[in-house]
């Protein structure tokens, strides 16, 4: 695994946990952790359960005892690392968004297609697909429970940057992150819309905004939060993104991604309305899916609250008794399970690099649409 910060910790937990709860066809061995600083990497390896450390990721690709490379670094490194790992015959798991640019994502996808011909697999870490309630929503839509998809409404709301004095991090640097709220959290709701409906977005019209253009430089970081210093630096990414478009099947879809929504810690919401009903999900109540059946008697009709913890629900049979909910970290464990099962079966894991390229095309289109649009102001004159 390359990188050991927020996502690296989540992935490490998943690699440790998956074989203890699921009957996996392959046994993961956490061989080597790669970081830039020897001492800090060694401490992270001890904490997270990795056997060895390395500071040169290229050296890892030469090792015969490494079969898979898990990339948990900022987006500006994804393309180089993933392409090199695939060329070296290593399976690859890379965090979302797949790349910082459409060009990089295309290069990665071409490399993944070529590697697949040699039996080398690749997957992108859109972990929210593995939340049981989201997986159930996909099943219900695919089964026709809500009829023909007519509308999609999706939001991803956070507030960790709403304070104008919150410190800078790499996530606010376009060269490293590619974009702001759009790529960081907007990518998730695009992927969820594609995943649940089975249809990609065919076009968008968008607006991006940056509310705070300068922030104090962080002295240290823990998770998303940092300690501010006295030096200040520019914010070069979007703070909020709003766009609408149409799915390939013609249904209109509306999206909002912001890290400035006070009081919203991780409110990722999606509602899909169809000709015969609707499904609705909010990650801040992640063990619940709401289902509306338009055929119900009008006197008692309403959204049905489904507690997605039964053994018949996706992934849940391996965990706790019904009613004992899962958490954020379980989606990453399910990600490991799906990846290893696909590798063992010699089939393409999902979401593939092609799936992630479809998301990257949307992110690119949103940026281009926002840059090309003009704002009309009514002056009254």
Image (cartoon, rainbow, N blue to C red):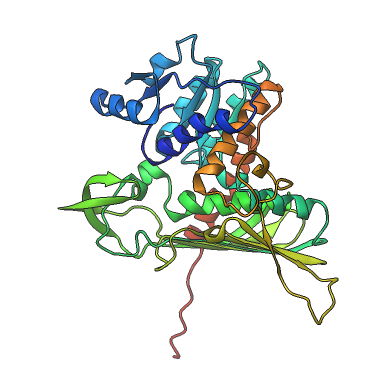
Q: Which residue is at the front of the view, 2 or 303? A: 303
Q: Residue at x 58, y 25 (%)?
A: 111
Q: Position of residue 319 (x, y in %)?
A: 61, 41
Residue 199 in sight from this viewpoint: no
Left-right relation of 230 to 183: left
Quarter of the image where one finds residue 366: bottom right
Left-right relation of 81 to 131: left
Q: Which residue is at the front of the view, 361 or 187? A: 187
Residue 248 in sight from this viewpoint: yes
Quarter of the image for the N terminus: give it. top left
Quarter of the image for the C terminus: give it. bottom left
Q: Residue at x 81, y 71 (%)?
A: 294
Q: Residue at x 42, y 52 (%)?
A: 180
Q: Position of residue 100 (x, y in %)?
A: 46, 41
Q: Residue furthest bottom?
A: 381
Q: Which residue is at the front of the view, 252 or 41? A: 41
Number of numbered labels in the structure image = 0
Q: Residue furthest top?
A: 64
In the rendered image of this protein, does residue 1 appear above or below residue 326? Answer: above
Left-right relation of 149 to 213: right
Q: Residue at x 56, y 30 (%)?
A: 20
């Amino acid at each position: 695994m390359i990188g050991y910060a927020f996502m690296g910790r989540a992935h490490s937990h998943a690699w440790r946990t998956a074989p203890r709860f699921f009957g996996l066809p392959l046994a993961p061995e956490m061989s080597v952790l790669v970081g830039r600083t020897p001492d800090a990497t060694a401490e992270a390896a001890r904490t997270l359960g990795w056997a060895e450390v390395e500071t040169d990721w290229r050296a890892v690709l030469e090792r015969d005892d490494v079969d898979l490379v898990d990339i948990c670094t900022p987006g500006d490194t994804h393309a180089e690392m993933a392409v090199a790992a695939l060329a070296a015959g290593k399976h690859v798991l890379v965090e979302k968004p797949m790349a910082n640019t459409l060009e990089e994502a295309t290069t990665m996808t071409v490399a993944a297609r070529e590697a697949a011909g040699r039996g080398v697999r690749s997957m992108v870490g859109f972990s929210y697909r593995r939340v049981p309630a989201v997986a159930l929503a996909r099943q219900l839509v695919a089964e026709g429970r809500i009829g023909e998809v007519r509308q999609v409404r999706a939001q991803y709301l956070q507030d960790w940057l709403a304070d104008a004095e919150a410190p800078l991090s790499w996530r606010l640097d376009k060269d490293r992150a590619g974009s702001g709220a759009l790529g960081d959290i907007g990518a998730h709701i695009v992927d969820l819309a594609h995943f649940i409906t089975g249809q990609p977005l065919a076009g968008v019209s968008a607006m991006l905004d940056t509310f705070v253009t300068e922030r104090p430089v962080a002295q240290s970081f823990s998770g998303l939060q940092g300690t501010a210093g006295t030096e200040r630096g520019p914010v070069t990414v979007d703070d909020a993104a709003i766009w609408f478009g149409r799915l390939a099947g013609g249904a209109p879809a509306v999206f909002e991604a912001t890290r400035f929504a006070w009081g919203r810690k991780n409110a990722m919401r999606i509602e899909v309305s169809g000709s015969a009903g609707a499904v609705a999900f909010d990650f801040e109540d992640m063990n619940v899916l709401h289902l509306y059946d338009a055929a119900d008697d009008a006197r008692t009709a309403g959204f049905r609250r489904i507690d997605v913890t039964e053994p018949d629900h996706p992934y849940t049979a391996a965990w706790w008794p019904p009613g004992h909910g899962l958490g954020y970290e379980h989606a990453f464990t399910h990600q490991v399970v799906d990846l290893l099962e696909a590798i063992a079966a010699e089939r393409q894991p999902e979401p593939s690099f092609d799936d992630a390229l479809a998301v990257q095309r949307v992110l690119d289109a949103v940026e281009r649409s926002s840059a090309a649009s003009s704002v009309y102001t009514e002056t009254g004159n």
